[in-house]
Image (cartoon, helix red, strand yellow):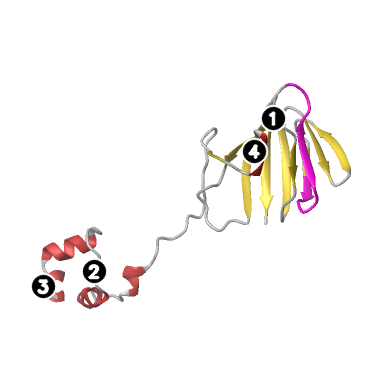
């Protein structure tokens, strides 16, 4: 019935509905009129997700600046658009090099296991499980494994 009112074949309408063909705007206008709808309703993008659930061990392995030092990053919210915070699980293993960083924004780390030596500006500190550190990431900062076991921590890059 919609195809007839719009003056197109059922086959054409079906192909448009299923995304098999791209329709000229003029055709979308007559289909909208046949449905008593506005053509803008056809052109709306899908709504952005309101949350992203990342199950244990299911984060996306990605490369970041620390990857060149051997560090491994697991993105915990990779599919959430327009975020101002990038959460990662970061693992530093024995044999990984000392990482030197400086970048815009702030950074927050919370050590889950292992030990790390961390320097922010001129301040050197050692962190163990349960310790947290929040700092201005425009300051030079250095990360190094302290000990012979991998260190794993939650790291938030905040813009």
- Residue matched to label 4: 68
Q: Secondary structure at mark 3?
A: helix
- Residue matched to label 1: 96
Q: What is the C-alpha distance between the residues marked 3 and 1?
A: 68 Å
Point out the residue furthest to the top here. Answer: 148
Horizontal arrangement in the rendering, residue 68 relative to residue 148 (left or right): left
- Residue matched to label 2: 23
- Residue matched to label 3: 4
Asked if residue 55 is positioned above or below residue 79 in the image, the reply reads: above
Sequence-first tag of 1 and 2: 2
Residue drawn at point x = 62 percent, y = 45 percent: 87
Sequence-first tag of 3 and 4: 3
- Counting from the top left corner in percent of width and height, residue 17 is at 23, 62
Query: Given this view, does label 3 or label 4 mark the residue nearer the observer?
Result: 4
Between residue 72 and residue 39, name the one nearer to us.
72
Quadrant position of the N terminus in the picture: bottom left
Q: Is residue 139 magenta?
A: yes
Residue drawn at point x = 31 percent, y = 76 percent: 38
């Amino acid at each position: 019935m919609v195809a007839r009112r719009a003056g197109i074949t059922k086959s054409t309408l079906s192909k448009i509905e299923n995304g098999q063909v791209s329709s000229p705007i003029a055709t979308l206008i007559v289909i909208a009129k046949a449905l008593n709808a506005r053509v803008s309703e056809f052109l709306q993008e899908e709504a952005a997700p309101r949350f992203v659930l990342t199950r244990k061990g299911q984060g996306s392995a990605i490369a970041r600046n620390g990857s060149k030092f051997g560090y491994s990053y697991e993105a915990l919210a990779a599919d959430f658009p327009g975020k101002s915070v990038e959460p990662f699980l970061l693992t530093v293993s024995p044999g990984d090099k000392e990482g030197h960083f400086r970048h815009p924004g702030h950074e927050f780390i919370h050590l889950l296991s292992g030990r790390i030596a961390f320097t922010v500006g001129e301040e050197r500190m050692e962190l163990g499980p349960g310790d947290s550190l929040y700092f201005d990431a425009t300051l030079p900062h250095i990360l190094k494994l302290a000990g012979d076991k991998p260190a794993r921590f939650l790291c938030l890059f905040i813009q």
